[in-house]
Image (cartoon, rainbow, N blue to C red):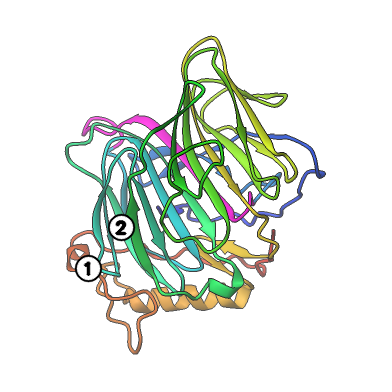
Amino acid sequence: MSNLETAPPEVTCVNAPDGALQLLRPREVPLGGPRAMPVRRTLPQRARSLIGAWCFADHYGPDDVSASATGGMRVPGHPHTGLQTVSWLFSGEIEHRDTTGAHALVRPGELNLMTAGSGIAHSEFSTPGTTVLHGAQLWVALPHAHRFTAPAFERYAPLPLEHDGARVLVFLGGLADLAGPASPVRTFSPLLGAEITLDAGRAIELALDPGFEHGVLVDTGRVTVGGATTAGPGELVYQPVGAGVLRLAASAEGKARVLLLGGEPLGERIVMWWNFIGRDHDEIAAYRAEWQAERGGDGEGTGTGTGTLRFGAFPAEWGQDGTLPAPELPHTRLRPRG
């Protein structure tokens, strides 16, 4: 997914003290034009910009994307560098195309992992048969040693597992308490990603890697994590390094579903602006200039820039939908964060 904000904000991170739980609330961002689909953006924000290598979290829906409502997800070709995108749906279907040649339908309960590495471009459109769209789009920052890796696309459908009455789908990494296999898809730093569904009033405990930071992103219902209780979708409870157990409880009001995200602290400072991750202002400015040159400045997604194409050859199907122009850079220099 693209960050479609015309003036992407620069976020200065101020981390909470070690050992403190944080309850992070999202802000609403329109995804698209006049009939934009709203998304709840929880990461990055001033209070916290990274959880392990997780650096971006959008939660959306359930949203009526029929012709009479928002019109759904319509994100033309756009670039990424230095990250992996994690697409996870609860309902609906999205058509994905990218410049590795991958063409896939993103479906509920199936991980779609795109590695941007040195540079990639992709598009995302909800399918004509989708009337309700509901899911999460997440980004993972690549560590310095791997940020110029070759672009790639992988899919994985995890088997549902049971733990104390909870239904768990582990799509990245693994959990020691569960007998199922760890996710086979490739990541470039130690990560965890899982969907957990709890019946009303149900509470569970899960063993965690104490070397990881963790975040519990709420999809539906209300949950309590440690001493923090959420109020609505898109809220996230951050649990710092050192915790070896996740204590998660659903309210008595109804079923709850969350995404559990975790990873070793990245330990690096990054610059994230629009859809690019780099290490300084000049690198981001160069990515922007290359994207504008490769799209030809005409918005038609021709991919006809001269020389080697950082973002790859554009799919022929983009001819009718075009590509997204990059926003203008801010008048001040971008600063690393992390």
Residue 289 is labelled as: none
Is residue 310 visible to us here? yes
Q: Quadrant of the C terminus?
A: bottom right
Q: Amino acid at mark 1?
A: Pro
Q: Determine whether the residue tagged by mark 2 lies in a helix, strand or loop.
A: strand
Q: Vertical placement of 132 versus 263: above or below? A: above
Whether residue 77 can be seen here: no
Of 308 and 195, nearer the camera is 195
Q: Position of residue 272 (x, y in %)?
A: 58, 62
Label 1: state its secondary structure: loop
**Residue 230 located left or right of residue 178:** right
Task: Give the magenta-colored segment's residue range.
Answer: 50-70
- Using the image, tell me which numbered label, if any, was put on residue 123: 2
Quadrant of residue 92 in the image? top left
Q: x, y percentage for residue 33?
A: 35, 46
Q: Where does label 1 land, which residue?
A: 315
Q: Residue 54 appears at what percent x and percent y?
A: 57, 52
